[in-house]
Image (tube, rainbow, N blue to C red):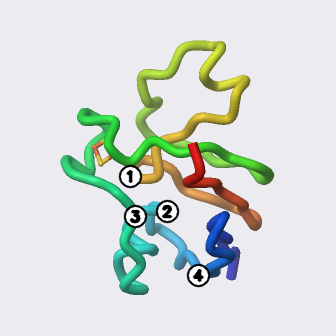
Amino acid sequence: MPKVRLLPSNIEFEVLSGQTVLQAALNNNIGLPHRCQVGACAMCMCKKVSGEVIYDLEPMLTEKEQQQGWMFPCLAYIESNLVLTLDE
Ligand code: FES
């Protein structure tokens, strides 16, 4: 099962297949910031340190933001381990 590690807390949680990163965090009682859960409010935006995400519905990110690693946990699915930072 792929895992997500959150920095700076170093908390880890597993993501079941078919779950978004945000759903998996909430199911594990991990309080990731969020509001709409559909990619509209940008409350959940955080930065990828490593790993790749895939989207059914591409979030509204500029090319620069994507290069900087910004992602939307409420829309993102993962296939391999992911490290995210909530530090910025
Ligand atoms: S929770 Fe609103 S964009 Fe992710």
Between the C-alphas of marks 1 and 4, the distance is 15 Å
Between the C-alphas of marks 2 and 1, the distance is 6 Å
Could you tell me which residue is drawn at 46 percent across and 52 percent down? 73
Could you tell me which residue is drawn at 44 percent across and 73 percent down? 25
Circle 3: element type: loop
User: In terms of sequence position, does the residue under pointer 2 or pointer 4 come before the other?
Assistant: 4
Residue 32, labelled with which disc?
A: 3
Residue 74, labelled with which disc?
A: 1
- Rendering quadrant holding ligand 1: top left
Circle 1: element type: loop
Q: Residue 21 at x, y = what percent?
A: 49, 62
Front-most of residues 72 and 7: 7
Residue 21, labelled with which disc?
A: 2
Q: Which residue is mark 4?
A: 13
User: In terms of sequence position, does the residue under pointer 3 or pointer 4 come before the other?
Assistant: 4
Residue type indicated by callout 1: Cys
